[in-house]
Image: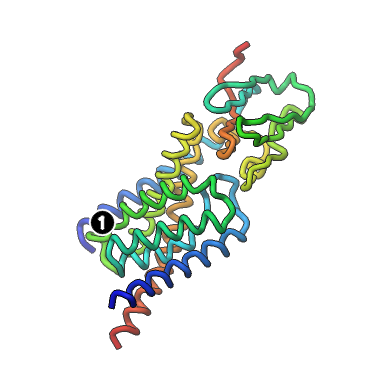
Amino acid sequence: MTKGVKLLITVVAVLFIGSIIWVILSHRASESTYVEIVQNNKVIYTFDLSKEKDRTFRIEDNNGGWNEIKIENGRISISDADCPDHTCVKTGVLKSETMPIVCLPHKLVIRFSEKEQS
Amino acid sequence: MKTKRLAELALLTAVALIIFIIELRIPNLVAIPGVKLGLANIITVYAVYKYSAKEVAMVVFSRVLLGSIFGGNISAIIYSMAGAVMCLIGMLAVKRIVPVNYIWLSSIIGAILHNTGQIIIAIIIMRSFAVMYHYPYLIISGCIAGAFTGICAQLLIKRVFASKSS
């Protein structure tokens, strides 16, 4: 085992362990009920989930793609989308502050916001 | 000799493409964009240790291009391409210091760099740092997937080299 290999193993191990610690530390449910929906880096909606009624609605992007957002019992999720991978649908309900719902094809992000804005 | 070389590279590309397309049929375990096994990279790792930089680049780029077309997800090609470029540069650089017995290591580094490239492109395209939150998850999955593909490539290379020398 040469010096270079040892160094690289150390770097990889530090990255790996660091990421695991980061994930564990950050995996807490959010206490905030304020959620914002961001598209193309612009905030297009903000909600207080504790006051929202149950409903579903569509958000369309500039190229005709859409995501169907579902609010139910104060929880928000993407219930359907016309993108090929459906990663955003599989993500499920928004739970953690560090883990937003992301739809890469439609440049859409749903995340908890700091506090009420309007 | 040159024709034989070309045929070998074409064969490798075809094998990588087949692995890639079969892997598309395996459902994702985790709902994080970018997390996957990357079995086609067994071929990349193998090629990095067996062929010159130019030849590996040819194999990888044609695999990514054809894979995006056959996979039916051309919009994702920019992510795959960015990942492939980063991965290739990293592995070719690391190849000088990492001997054949530690291929799994250079494969892990390749996987991490692959995910790094994808995250950078995602940040540029979405003009938002929200996707950065996925990065630690991608590093963990990259380490596991990279180690797996690396070990596969290592077994492959040992067998091929052994059968060549005998």
Let me know if residue B101 appears in the view. Answer: no
**Residue B37: % across, % down:** 51, 58
Farthest residue, direction bottom: B166
Let me know if residue B153 appears in the view. Answer: yes
Question: In the figure, is residue A21 to the left or right of A44?
Answer: left
Of the residues shown, which amino acid type is indicated by label 1? Lys
Q: Quadrant of the N terminus of chain A?
A: bottom left
In the figure, residue B69 lies in which quadrant?
Answer: bottom right
**Residue B94: % across, % down:** 27, 56
Q: Nearer the viewer, residue B19 or A14?
A: B19
Farthest residue, direction top: A118
Q: Chain of mark 1?
A: A
Q: Nearer the viewer, residue A100 or A67?
A: A67
In the picture of the structure, the residue carrying the numbered disc 1 is A6
In the figure, residue A105 lies in which quadrant?
Answer: top right
Question: In the figure, is residue B79 to the left or right of A38?
Answer: left
